[in-house]
């Protein structure tokens, strides 16, 4: 008899896998400096990366969790820097509060303007986004240039996002851009160092929308 | 005078950032066991993760690079396990050879069948994919269950992919699924351990399509 028949469930269900994973993370992380709600984000970042070092490197503005949850509950726009971040975000949990998710980097007018000014699409996409996503959540997982431009626009009083998740990965400007973000007195979630990326940015945002669903 | 005017390019261009990043990776990686072409994949995985440990954990079947490049050049289908992997793949470089990228996990018939059999959509998506992507590249960055099912189908002679990129991340089944993949004598790219994920899977595939473009 073939135990691998087509009709035999081969694995446990995704929810069970997630629960077991979270137990393992709880067991392995040991002491940490995070609040209970911050830890929900840290836990999901570790789950998405299998990297405790990355999870431990997260830095939260004191208002970050509250501000992020409120922005989601108030149906504010989510602005990922790239399509990959957008693809990973749990859309139903954003839309049930009336929010939407909008990436600007491939808009024809953004591409044209970047060419005209000889700069990056990431930069121009932030200039466009701040006009259409006041009070929203910016989720930057890829482009340090987008994060640096967003920081500039915030410093100059051009915009006041509900929350900035700034977790770009890389060897050039990524760590530096996150250091700059951590200096601002606005709600932010970021981390120390080169690591980061689309998957952990998605994990952080999805952790917040799960918190937003809770009473 | 304000140096942060709207018309001043604020950063170097993306290609320059990438070139500089690759130089830094070359300087920091030190001795490694990879061939020149395998290293192209490793380098891009490190670029996408800022994680040398992850880059060094990659394992290549001896035919992996050649088989992957040939599959892309022959216009074979690319099958990512999830939308996030699809979103990151450089589409023009696949399409110029006549290939396409197709995710099955959200197909209505896949969802129905998974419900009927009380199993995961990831598993059913692989059963459907093998019928439509003979000789193609499977790029599994998220779901160990998808990879385990694909391995089962290969072992039972149901399919012979051109290449399997198996880099799921996680605490349950991820490392084990990759160990199983590494035992097969088919072209594969995988790694040792829990780490992996959508961004590094994308990086590996994009490295191959860049190689495919070279003479």
Image: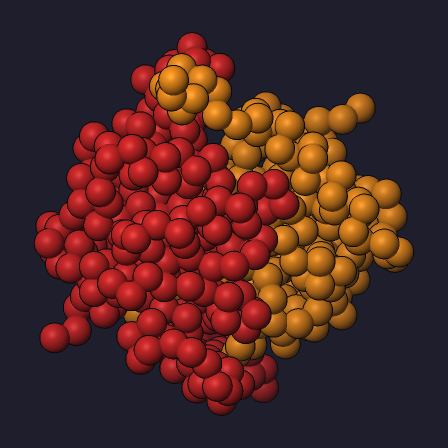
Chain colours: A orange, B red
Query: Where does the image place residue A155, in percent across and percent down from the top left?
Result: 68, 68
Vertical relation: B160 (above or below) B205: above
Query: Residue drawn 31% across and 28% down?
Result: B127
Q: Nearer the viewer, residue A176 or B165?
A: B165
Query: Residue drawn 36% across and 68% down?
Result: B41
- Let me know if residue A201 appears in the view: no
Query: Quadrant of the image for the C terminus of chain B?
Result: bottom left
Query: Residue drawn 74% across and 46% down?
Result: A25
Q: Quadrant of residue B129?
A: top left
Query: Residue drawn 46% across and 81% down?
Result: B32
Q: Quadrant of residue B138?
A: top left
Query: Where does the image place residue A206, in percent across and percent down from the top left?
Result: 62, 39
Query: Where does the image place residue A14, in percent across and percent down from the top left?
Result: 57, 29
Q: Nearer the viewer, residue B43 or A140?
A: B43
Query: Quadrant of the image for the N terminus of chain B?
Result: bottom right
Q: Nearer the viewer, residue A141 or B94?
A: B94
Q: Nearer the viewer, residue B201 or A3?
A: A3
Answer with left or right where residue A64 lies relative to residue B164: right
Vertical relation: A48 (above or below) A55: above
Vertical relation: A6 (above or below) A134: above
Answer with left or right where residue B39 lies relative to residue B210: right
- Marker count (numbered): 0
Query: Where does the image place residue B137, in percent across and percent down from the top left?
Result: 26, 48
Answer with left or right where residue A43 lies relative to residue A205: right
- Let me know if residue B215 appears in the view: yes
């Amino acid at each position: 008899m073939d135990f691998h028949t087509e009709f035999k469930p081969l694995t446990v269900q995704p929810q069970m896998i997630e629960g077991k994973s979270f137990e393992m993370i709880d067991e392995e992380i040991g002491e940490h400096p995070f609040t209970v709600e911050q830890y929900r984000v840290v836990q999901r970042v570790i789950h998405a990366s299998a990297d405790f070092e990355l999870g431990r490197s997260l830095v939260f503005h004191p208002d970050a969790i509250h501000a992020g949850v409120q922005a989601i509950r108030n149906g504010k726009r989510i602005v990922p820097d790239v399509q990959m971040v957008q693809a990973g975000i749990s859309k139903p949990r954003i839309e049930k509060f009336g929010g939407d998710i909008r990436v600007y980097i491939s808009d024809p007018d953004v591409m044209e303007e970047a060419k005209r000014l000889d700069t990056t699409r990431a930069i121009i996409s932030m200039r466009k986004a701040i006009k259409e996503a006041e009070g929203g959540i910016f989720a930057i997982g890829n482009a340090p240039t987008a994060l640096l431009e967003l920081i500039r626009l915030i410093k100059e009083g051009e915009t006041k996002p509900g929350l900035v998740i700034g977790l770009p990965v890389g060897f050039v400007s990524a760590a530096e851009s996150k250091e700059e973000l951590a200096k601002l007195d606005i709600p932010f979630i970021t981390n120390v160092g080169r690591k980061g990326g689309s998957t952990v940015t998605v994990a952080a945002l999805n952790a917040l929308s799960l918190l937003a669903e809770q009473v």
